[in-house]
Image (cartoon, rainbow, N blue to C red):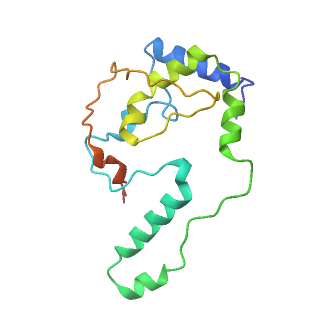
Amino acid sequence: MKRYNVTFAEFVRYVLDERAAGRTLDRHWVPQHELCRVCQYRYDFIGHHETLLRDAEFVVATLKSRIPDLEQRRQVENVTFPVESGRRKSVDLVRQMYAGVPAAHMQALYRLYAVDYALFGFQYPNVTGFAPTRPAADHTANTDVTGDSELDDRVKVQS
C-alpha cells in the first residue's frame, strides 16, 4: 500500500481543489447525501458518531425486538455493540487536526457538506473555539432536499 506524507490541512485543500475542478470525490469524503440517496429510501434511524454507543444500543435493541421467534431472540439477547477502546477522545484529535486548516478552507468545507449537516442533523464542529456561521448550502449537486424532519429517526437496514 502506498502511503502519502501529507498534513490534514493539505488533504482538506486537495478535497476542496478536486471538488472545485469538478472531479468526482472518493466515496469516503464525498458529501454523504450524494451516496445515501436520502430522498429515495425510507430510513428507520440515522446515527451519529458523537452518540455512537447510545445509537448502536438503540439499533441493536430495535433489531432484536423485530425477531418474532422467542427462541431465536433468546439466542441473540447477549449481542451488544463493542464498548469504547479508551483511546484518545475524537474531539481532541479533531481539534488537533483542524488546527492547521485556514479559516477560508473551514468555511469551504462547511459549504461543501452543508446539505449533509441539514439532512442528517449533524452539528457544525467547533474546532477553533469560535462558533462557525452556518453557510448557505452549495446546491450545485443534483439533490432533492425535502426538509423532512423525520430523517433524524431513520436508519436503513439492508440485507
Q: Nearer the viewer, residue 110 or 10?
A: 110
- Residue at 72 percent across and 24 percent down: it is 7
- Residue at 34 percent across and 54 percent down: it is 153
The residue lying furthest to the bottom in this view is 71
- Residue at 50 percent across and 65 percent down: it is 57
Q: Position of residue 69 (x, y in %)?
A: 34, 84
Image position of 37 (left or right of 18):
left
Q: Position of residue 147 (x, y in %)?
A: 27, 37
Q: Position of residue 121 (x, y in %)?
A: 41, 42
**Where 132 falls versus 150 (above or below)?**
above
- Residue at 38 percent across and 35 percent down: it is 118
**Where 104 falls versus 93 (above or below)?**
above
Image position of 105 (left or right of 91):
left
* Image quadrant where one finds the C terminus: bottom left
Number of marks: 0
* Image quadrant where one finds the N terminus: top right
Which image quarter: residue 128?
Answer: top right
Q: Nearer the viewer, residue 85 or 76?
A: 85
Which image quarter: residue 131?
Answer: top right
Image position of 99 (left or right of 52):
right
Q: Nearer the viewer, residue 122 or 59?
A: 122
**Where 141 falls versus 118 (above or below)?**
above
The residue lying furthest to the front in this view is 130
Q: Nearer the viewer, residue 108 or 158?
A: 108
